[in-house]
């Protein structure tokens, strides 16, 4: 797979600096500051020069995004289905031109559907209820995890979010190994984008879905469970609680679902028998 930016001005910075004023409620004097805010740009995704979707995204790790988005949308089945990726500057944003293998392009064109950007709700733009994502159940037995491993990963989480540390305005998706060591992090203004970027990075690295678990810092919704299942992972840890449909899909796909993850406790919504208490203290 070849990847290359095709414009001299690429890549666009993922952070912009802007003047701002801090006002306090206790009557203190206003303070002028320079604040870092995350860049958000329209990214048009095309396959074979045919538009597929426009996503509002942070303009970083776009090659990972191309692979992860393509996989979780069902356009590809493996990273090798993509022959090349080009990131191009356009007047109103960026274009992510994805070159599929001939066989995969034919399959994609046969099932193509129109989408609009999905940073907000995750499902805007689908044509009807039959177009709802339906990931296949992952194969194999879900891994067992210790509380210590989950706690260790959560303890590392904040320090691994470099973009959020600067902006306080982006989501993160994280891959940790079964001992709880964080191995890969991706951040984006869109929670779905962050997870797609993470999945794309793992696919490009050849990571085994059974070798770890995922953490998301955002709301745990139906689409995030679907994306985790599309990659083949079996455990999802979320900082928030799941929605009802997310829990329903996690049960159907038999994905261990952990929510309300805090420094002192977690809530297991499905798969509690796979979480053991060995070596809790870390």
Image: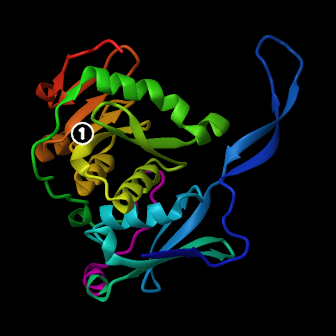
73 vs 3: above or below: above
Q: At x 20% / y 59%, what residue is drawn?
A: 134
User: Percent position (x, y) of residue 127?
Assistant: 31, 69
Q: At x 41% / y 57%, what residue is drawn?
A: 201
157 vs 254: above or below: above
Left or right, 280 with reference to 249: right
Q: Which residues are magenta?
A: 106-125
Left or right, 78 with reference to 68: left
The foreground one among 97 and 28 is 97
Looking at the rendered image, the quarter that the C terminus falls into is top left
Looking at the rendered image, the quarter that the N terminus falls into is bottom left
User: Percent position (x, y) of residue 228?
Assistant: 28, 49
Q: At x 20% / y 65%, what residue is drawn?
A: 130
User: Percent position (x, y) of residue 206?
Assistant: 32, 59
Crowding at dot 1, Cα within 10 Å, few <14 / some 14-19 / many 20+, comes out as many
Q: Is residue 97 visible?
A: no
Which residue is identified by label 1?
Answer: 235
The foreground one among 159 and 88 is 159
Indicate whether residue 110 is drawn in magenta: yes
Name which quarter of the figure residue 230 lies in: bottom left
207 vs 9: above or below: above
């Amino acid at each position: 797979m070849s990847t290359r930016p095709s414009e001299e001005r690429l890549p666009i910075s993922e952070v912009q600096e802007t003047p701002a004023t801090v006002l306090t409620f206790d009557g203190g004097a206003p303070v002028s500051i320079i604040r870092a805010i995350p860049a958000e740009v329209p990214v048009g995704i095309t396959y074979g020069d045919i538009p597929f979707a426009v996503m509002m995204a942070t303009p970083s790790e776009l090659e990972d995004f191309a692979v992860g988005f393509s996989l979780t949308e069902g356009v590809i089945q493996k990273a090798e289905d993509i022959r090349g990726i080009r990131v191009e500057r356009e007047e109103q944003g960026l274009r992510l031109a994805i070159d599929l293998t001939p066989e995969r392009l034919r399959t994609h064109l046969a099932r193509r559907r129109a989408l609009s950007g999905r940073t907000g709700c995750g499902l805007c733009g689908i044509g009807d209820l039959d177009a709802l994502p339906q990931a296949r159940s992952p194969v194999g037995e879900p891994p067992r995890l210790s509380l210590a491993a989950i706690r260790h990963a959560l303890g590392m989480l904040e320090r691994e979010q470099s973009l959020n540390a600067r902006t306080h305005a982006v989501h993160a998706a994280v891959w940790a190994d079964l001992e709880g060591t964080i191995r890969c992090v991706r951040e984006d203004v869109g929670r779905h984008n962050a997870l797609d970027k993470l999945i794309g990075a793992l696919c490009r690295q050849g990571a085994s879905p059974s070798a770890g678990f995922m953490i998301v810092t955002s709301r745990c919704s139906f689409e995030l469970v679907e994306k985790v299942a599309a990659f083949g992972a079996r455990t999802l840890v979320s900082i928030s609680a799941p929605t009802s449909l997310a829990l329903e899909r996690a049960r159907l796909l038999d994905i261990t679902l952990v929510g309300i993850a805090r420094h002192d406790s977690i809530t297991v919504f499905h798969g509690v028998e796979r979480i053991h208490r060995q070596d809790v203290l870390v």
